[in-house]
Image (tube, rainbow, N blue to C red):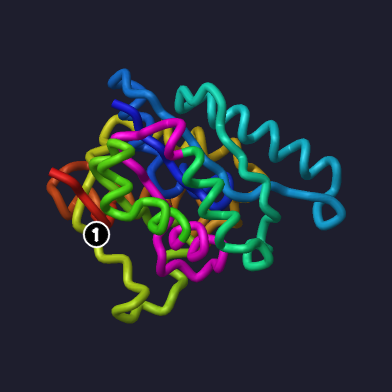
Amino acid sequence: MRVLAVSAHPDDETLGCGGTLLRHFASGDEVHWLIATSRRSPRWSADEISLRELQIKNVAAAYGVLQPVELGHPDAELERVPMADLIEGIDAVLSDVRPDIVYVVHGGDVHSDHVLVHTATMSALKTFRMRLLGVRRVLAFETLSSTDAAVQDLRHAFLPTVYSDITGYLEEKCSVLEHYCSELQDPWQPRTTSAVTALARVRGASIGVEHAEAFMLLRELV
């Protein structure tokens, strides 16, 4: 099985579906990773850019990703990129990977980069395109500090319908998250290993297991 994680920024994938990606890798599945944005100067220093490149390399190795694809759009400035260009880049990766399952950032997140990546991905994954590409399921994941920070009305709410048992993978997920040392927050804030653990416990309780990740099923072909 081939799976593709689509993230706006490095760390989205680990916060949202890191345990599930580790399960896929352990099961012998082929894991692919698309990152829509990259850090650029002068907004980011050379040291910050180098650190981000090292983080991506280490995280990719943890998930067995041979070559993560970076579209290279400006981090936190994705609204400046024409939607057609964003769709084209995502579509090219989908056509190359032809994944069975796609994991993507949630469309109701508070971060505008997440919203745009979600919109572009779903545009590239129109139902008839899914069939042509061989994609069977599209799942949205929740990203602490972005999904939970959005206004929870009917348009934006994350309403989980699919759960992945990550019991046995949570500790490793937290270890992977620690590669993003520059992104982790102070204790009692959402982007921390303690918050990730707490959310996994809550999601696990929903299905009667120790730890889980939750997803919204967006599209499925059966």
Q: Is residue 180 visible?
A: yes
Query: What crowding class fits label 1: few (fewer than 14 Cα within 10 Å), some (14-19), or many (20 or more)?
Result: some
Q: What amino acid type should be assigned to the residue bearing mark 1?
A: Pro
> Residue drawn 28% across and 36% down?
134
Residue 32 vs residue 135, the one in the foreground: 135
From the viewer's perspective, is 94 left or right of 73?
A: left
**Residue 39, above or below 142:** above
Q: What is the span of residues highlighted in magenta in the rendered image?
A: 94-119
Point out residue 179 in the picture as x, y percentages from the top left corner.
Answer: 59, 36
Q: Is residue 170 visible?
A: no
Task: Give the secondary structure at mark 1.
Answer: loop
From the viewer's perspective, is 89 left or right of 161?
A: right
> Residue drawn 32% across and 72% down?
157
> Residue drawn 32% across and 23% down?
29
The quadrant in which residue 46 appears is top right
In the picture, the quarter occupied by the N terminus is top left
Residue 100 vs residue 185, the one in the foreground: 100
> Residue drawn 49% across and 26% down?
65
Point out residue 140 in the picture as x, y percentages from the top left corner.
Answer: 34, 54
Instruction: Residue under label 1, please give it.
Output: 160
- How many numbered discs sit on the rendered protein? 1
- Is 121 magenta? The answer is no
Residue 197 vs residue 66, the one in the foreground: 66
From the viewer's perspective, is 89 left or right of 15?
A: right
Point out residue 159 in the picture as x, y percentages from the top left corner.
Answer: 25, 65
In the picture, the quarter occupied by the C terminus is top left
Point out residue 30 in the picture as x, y percentages from the top left corner.
Answer: 37, 24
